Amino acid sequence: MTRKARSPLLVILAALVLPGTWMWFRSENWNIEDAANIDRLPHIRPDFSDAVIPPNIAPLNFVVQEPGTRFLVNIRSKHTTPIRVVSRSPKIEIPPQLWRSLLEANRGEDLHFELYSQVEGRWQQFQSINNRIAPHPIDGHLVYRLTGQIHNFWNEISIFQHDLATNEKLPVIEGKAIEHGCVNCHSFSNNRPNQMCIGMRSSQYGSGAIVVTNGEAKKLGRKLGYTTWHPSGRLAVYSINKVRQFFHTAQSSVRDVIDMDSALEYFDVETEQVSLIQQASDRKRLETYPCWSPDGEHLYYCSAPILWEDSDAVPPERYAEVKYDLMRIHYDLETDTWGEPELVLSAEKTGLSILQPRISPDGKFLLFCMCRYGCFPIYQPTSDLYIMDLETREYMKPDINSSSAEAWHSWSSNSRWIAFSSRRRGGVFTRCYLSFVDESGQAHKPFILPQNDPEAYDSLLKSMSVPELTSAPIPIDAQEMARVARSEDAFGVDAMSEATTLVDMSEPWEPGHR
Amino acid sequence: MKPIPGTIEKSIRTIGWDTAFFLLAFFLYVWLVIDPHLIHHSLGITMPLEPFSVSIGWSFFAEHLSRPGGLVEYAARWLTQFFWWSWAGALIISCAAYLMCLAMDVLAFESGFKRGHVARYVPAMMMLVAWAGYNHPIRPVLSVLTALGGFVLYLVASRLSVVKRPVLLLATSLLAISTVVYITAGPSAGLLFNALVAIYETFVKRRWPLGVAAVCVGALVPWAVGMALFQNAIRNAYDGFFIHTPGVESWCIRYMLIMHLIFPATLATTTLFHRFRKAKAGSPESRTLDSETTTHDAAANVRVWLNKQHLWGASQIAIVFSVAGVIAWSASNVETRRILRINDFAQRGMWPQVLSIAQDLPKGQYNVYCIRNIQLALYHAGAGQLSEDMFRYTQVPGISLLQLPKAQQTAYTSFQESQVYLQLGQVNLAQRCACEALETLSDSPELLEHLAVINILKDRPETAMMFLRERLKKPFHRRTARAMLSELEEDPQLASDPRVRQLRKLMIRTDHAGDQTNEEVLKASLQDDPNNRFAFELLIANYLHTGRTDKIIETLAHPLGLKFQPLPRHIQEAIVVYSLQTYGRMPEPNAQIGAHVIDQAIQFDRIGRRYGTDNQGAQAEAIAAGLGTTFYFYFKFGASGL
């Protein structure tokens, strides 16, 4: 046969064989009609079951932890045709477009994952994994800090923003941009990223904060500790902390942190002045974790007595007895006057240290954590989240906690979602979790922040902490943030009090990187 | 397509026996003398590990596509893994050397010579100097090779362009190859490629517009591709490998510069020289090669070899080989080699070999890793051996197996400490040091396994699995990681593993918050497990180090101390010192203290008295009397092993 005659024949053969192969692949191998029933739920990783999920969340991709050579998942809800995902590996990656349409069309409905696996040529069907789609969306972005397991030295600390609808991750600022400096304590005004601040510390570019107002970033020549923005956006209250880190030789958690001293200051955006809140800066007490009420009339914070005389010994005597009370103080924005501190919940009553108060934007609930002692709950395996009804001041421990530490929580702008950090998966690396909170303040089973690669967490040797929900992406890119952080023209602030001499500012990981 | 006379292949065919001999000698030297395994081992110790660490998977590869030079960086990471096998590392280096020789021949050929002659070996020798000094210039080498490859491609395009559309085709080729070279190998490769093209077009081909174009492209591509496409800062877009190259120490940068510059320099000088020679001879241009060089008949080669001209060539080669030998010999960093070998043997638990090489270490000099490895080797040599022989080797106050002074701390010492703490049962301290090593050293497979074990001991199998899954991404470590993962899935506590069982037994249970001295750490380990021989021997060594003779005597009352029969030499010496300090007299020889120990003490005392405050004189005489390896000497002068 000549070459000329052979070519058309090959084309015809290919035209017959290829579609045939494809048809065979589609029809023969994925026929699940005769699947045997397995009377239990399948094991999947991450655990996306019995959760309430936002209608605008990215696909909940997962890994099937069941034996099998082929896997098939039908994802169905009430109002749309199911999505069928087939895979020859245990990794189930859901097509984003179909997923989005399904969630959008089924707000408030149940969502089922019907999972099949093929073992030795026979299909088997597991019980359906059920979730529910909430009618309320979650804020579009989550800003978190990504760090290694830092003790004394670090290589890279970065702040990232995660698009919850697409799982796209973008750096907000990277420590390497400021000569491996430290970036921390990001906080937003009313979940809006056009007014925010990020703390920074760099051996080359100094310590300070990047303050974003009206979408414009400036470098503040003063470091802000834990910061809370007044709802008006006109001022920010922050803590100044003399933090010391120490280590345990035989406890589960190696690291521990103590505030040797702390106080609260506030920064006026317009006048660029800082002032000490005298009423919340008792020299015999520690004050930290400020949080504004949504009406801007009260500042909540945590306060504990200083139990030691020697302020140089680390850890100080009776460090394990330090327990913080929850306090609040009235503020009048127009006259710039503070009231007297008021006890909201005492550590004596709870027997635990009360930390990190965060109030829902609708003003109904206060989310906080409590642990056995101290000021740094994420290092305390006993730390759990609690919700207080601000009307009755009754609090309860929601069923979202684990035997590991939970802390660093934030609310979505519609008050229906919380994001928090937890070490439940392994006890060492912190991960971000999302949970739905209904109108009665009931928090539902949390689920881990989804990733496009469902195996992403399996070998991620980094902690993702301080998750803050924001209603929009941060309007300044990482290059610009880095440029501002590196700039020499930091704007100074006028200190209106002796606040600057009260405590020295430091980080829990003291000596710096090498 | 019909071959064009004077093609590049012709120059390649002229590689002869001299090159073969050179490459064979080169390969053997690299394999047997430099030992590329030691270069692999040095990553994370004397060289940074992160730039040469590799992970399997698309995301790791994709990350390298995001910057110019990323592909060469990725290739360098992979090739480095093969340095684990010395022969494979030597083969990689030799292949690179061969390609550089080849490239020199191509350049010489293009400018009118048959081969690169002596200069052809220069880049290979530069590489040899760098690797012999235990640098790892794999990135700049690959970068240069990419630029040279790009230039050869351009030459091929240049030959094609002879046929039709020369200028347009060449300009397009120039732009395309320059961009590809820049993206693949980074700014320095782009610069080298464009320099070669500019010289070639201006001096060899006398097409100066193309020469100017090459200069312009060289300047514009980093701006257009580096800054606009990859969004690099201007410094990063133009800054290349040979300025800040991981694996190349500052003393070695000049050799890397020569390796880069030799190619354009050769092309320019040989072209000008050829032109000058022609002008002098007044002959028309003739670039045909001698036909005999393309003949591959062996007999003909022998005949040619006997030719006078080739005798001159042979003597030239002999000179080259002699010079190369001298360079190789002088570049060889024997000290680093010894240090790395000691560390390598220590990591593999080959303790007798550690002590054997330690004998050859220069007296009076010290290296933190060596001191620590020798201490470990002595401990593993048998009960009491550490207290018997530690001052036979260099010891420096403050340098022990535990916490080091800040100035001595490195990422690798953190890993070493972590391993020691784990053996002591101090799992939290081991975790802390290992985490610090992970932050600063990067994810070495050994460290990942170590962290997995720590988390297994702390009943955190899920975290242990995270470390093992990360190890699973490391080529050549997947099998062991997978085996451990399956064991862990079946038995989350790994209770059946004898190593884990033993470590679990040693784990301390009494918590302490805050910093501890080395003594406190060791005592805590010993308190929780009185049979912890490692803690006991390190405690004695710690007291010897710090000169606390009273504490040594106190510690000997421990049940493990009572087992010493006879007492190790340095402990006997410490008892003598204690007796002199406390009672002002020498003890009598008895069952515990040998007569020889007391004789040495008397001798040392006499020397001390004779020289009074003249420490230098006393030291010299004590060393001459063979007392430089005693506790007396260390106690008095803070040095040993002399």
Image (spheres, coloured by chain):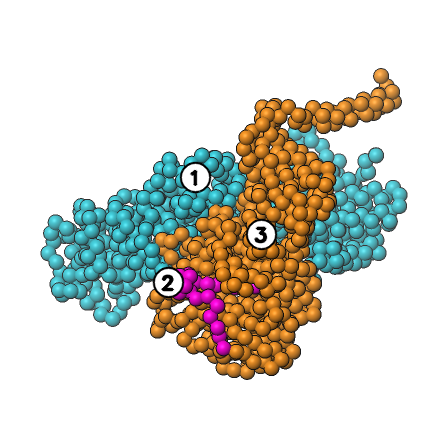
* Residue B631 included in the magenta stretch of the image: no
For residue A409, above or below residue A209: above
Mark 3, residues whose alpha carbon is within 10 Å: few (<14), some, or many (≥20)?
many
The mark lying in front, picked from 3 and 2, is: 3
Quick check: A457 left or right of B200? left
- Residue visible at 60% across and 40% down in the picture: A130
For residue B565, above or below residue B20: below
| Chain of residue at mark 3 | A
- Residue visible at 58% across and 76% down in the picture: A267
Mark 1, residues whose alpha carbon is within 10 Å: few (<14), some, or many (≥20)?
some
Type of amino acid at the residue the image marks with label 2: Ala
- Residue farthest along the right direction in this orientation: B164
Provide the letter of the chain coloured cyan: B
Image location (x, y in percent) of residue A356: 51, 63
**From this viewpoint, is residue A332 visible?**
yes
Q: Give yes or no for contact between labels 1 and 3 (Cβ–Cβ under 8 Å).
A: no
Secondary structure, mark 3, is strand
The mark lying in front, picked from 1 and 2, is: 2
Q: Quadrant of the N terminus of chain B?
A: top right
Q: Nearer the viewer, residue B440 or B355?
A: B440
| Chain of residue at mark 1 | B
Image location (x, y in percent) of residue A457: 56, 46
Residue at numbered disc 1: B492
- Residue visible at 15% across and 64% down in the picture: B582
Q: Quadrant of the C terminus of chain B?
A: bottom left
Magenta-drawn segment:
A340-359
Type of amino acid at the residue the image marks with label 1: Pro
Q: Nearer the viewer, residue A256 or A58?
A: A58
Drawn colour of chain A? orange
The mark lying in front, picked from 1 and 3, is: 3
Q: Which mark is residue A320?
A: 2
